[in-house]
Image (cartoon, rainbow, N blue to C red):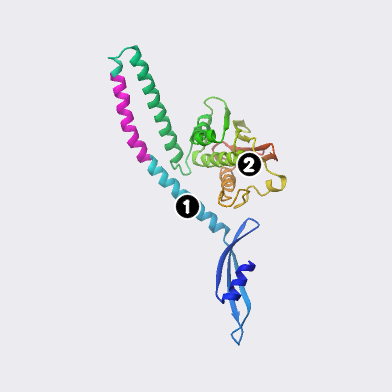
């Protein structure tokens, strides 16, 4: 702020800049005020809180990115599925003419084709826009799919993961919102661990809804920062490594589904996020 006012005095020009103050973003405009002798003795300072505008722009940008990714993923999936279909069909034909050794090789080919198909399905599920539609989601499978999208980065950082959820547990929910919640919590956990750690995701029925626990053994969060963790633009990461919107968006997605989110953390030991979501986003809010 002082530098902006100083520039206005020294250069006799209007200045415009953005400053961050207590997790809020302000647009600062300064104007030199001249007296009757044309000397600048005062500066007019106007400040506008543009936090909501910044958040809206970031959300719109993210939505446009997701739409572009969805269109790209659909095109790539179509192009890749065609040759995979040819490989699968010819593998089936070859089995009728082959011996045991060749059949073993064909098994490897079929397994690779199935794996490639699963990867394509994951990418399409991740990138599709579902709007406000609610549907029954296989929770365990959905969590695994989110984690598998980051499996290379998890392996690179030496992070193992475990999912604890009953088989074929289906829950009525907005898939797009759940996706944003899990992706942001996963990203936060990976940043907290940095390398050689563990992430555990638990999901189970609770109070006529679902409770999801996201646990990491990373660096943890000190008590004074826990109060700020869901504030917009708050980040403890190095400059350029985070927007400070990830957990803010997570909080808003949870509230949009009429749920609740809480956090337990101990510096040096790790963090646990607990997310409660009512079935179908109904009006019965639970507490955790």
Q: Is residue 123 left or right of residue 270?
A: left
Q: At 46% across and 44% down in the image, what residue appears?
A: 131
Q: Secondary structure at mark 2?
A: strand
Residue at the disc numbered 1: 61
Name the foreground residue: 54 vs 252.
54
Above or below 24: residue 104:
above
Rendering coords of residue 20 (x, y %): 61, 59
Rendering coords of residue 137 (x, y %): 50, 33
Residue at the disc numbered 2: 261
Above or below 112: residue 39:
below
Q: Secondary structure at mark 1?
A: helix
Q: Which residue is most to the top?
A: 100
Report which quarter residue 3 is drawn in: bottom right
Report which quarter residue 51 is drawn in: bottom right
Of helix, strand and loop, which mostly describes the magenta segment? helix
Q: Nearer the viewer, mark 2 or mark 1?
A: 1
Asked whether the beta carbons under mark 2 and mark 1 sit within 8 Å of each other, the answer is no
Quadrant position of the N terminus in the picture: bottom right
Residue 258: assigned label: none
Q: CA distance from mark 2 to mark 1?
A: 25 Å
Rendering coords of residue 34 (x, y %): 60, 82
Q: Which residues are magenta?
A: 74-93
């Amino acid at each position: 702020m002082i530098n902006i006012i100083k520039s206005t005095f020294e250069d006799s020009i209007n200045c415009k800049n953005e400053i961050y103050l207590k997790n809020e973003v302000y647009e600062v405009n300064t104007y030199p005020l001249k007296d009757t002798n044309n000397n600048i003795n005062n500066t007019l300072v106007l400040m506008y809180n543009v936090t909501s505008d910044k958040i809206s722009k970031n959300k719109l940008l993210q939505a446009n990115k997701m739409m572009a990714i969805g269109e790209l993923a659909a095109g790539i999936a179509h192009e890749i599925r065609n040759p995979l279909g040819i490989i699968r069909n010819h593998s089936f034909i070859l089995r009728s003419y082959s011996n045991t050794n060749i059949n073993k090789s064909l098994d490897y080919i079929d397994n690779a084709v199935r794996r490639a198909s699963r990867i394509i399905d994951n990418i399409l599920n991740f990138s599709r826009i579902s709007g406000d539609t609610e549907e029954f989601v296989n929770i365990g499978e959905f969590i695994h799919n989110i984690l598998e999208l980051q499996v290379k980065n998890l392996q690179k950082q030496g992070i193992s993961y475990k999912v604890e959820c009953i088989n074929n547990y289906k829950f009525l929910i907005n898939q797009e919102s759940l996706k944003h919640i899990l992706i942001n919590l996963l990203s936060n956990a990976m940043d907290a661990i940095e390398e050689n750690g563990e992430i555990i995701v638990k999901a189970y029925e609770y109070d006529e809804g679902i409770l999801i626990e996201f646990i990491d053994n990373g660096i943890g969060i000190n008590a004074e920062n826990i109060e700020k963790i869901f504030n917009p633009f708050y980040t403890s990461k190095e400059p350029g490594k985070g927007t400070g919107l990830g957990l803010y968006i997570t909080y808003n997605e949870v509230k949009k589904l009429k749920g609740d989110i809480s956090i337990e953390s101990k510096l040096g030991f790790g963090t646990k996020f607990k997310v409660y979501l009512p079935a179908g986003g109904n009006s019965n809010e639970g507490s955790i």
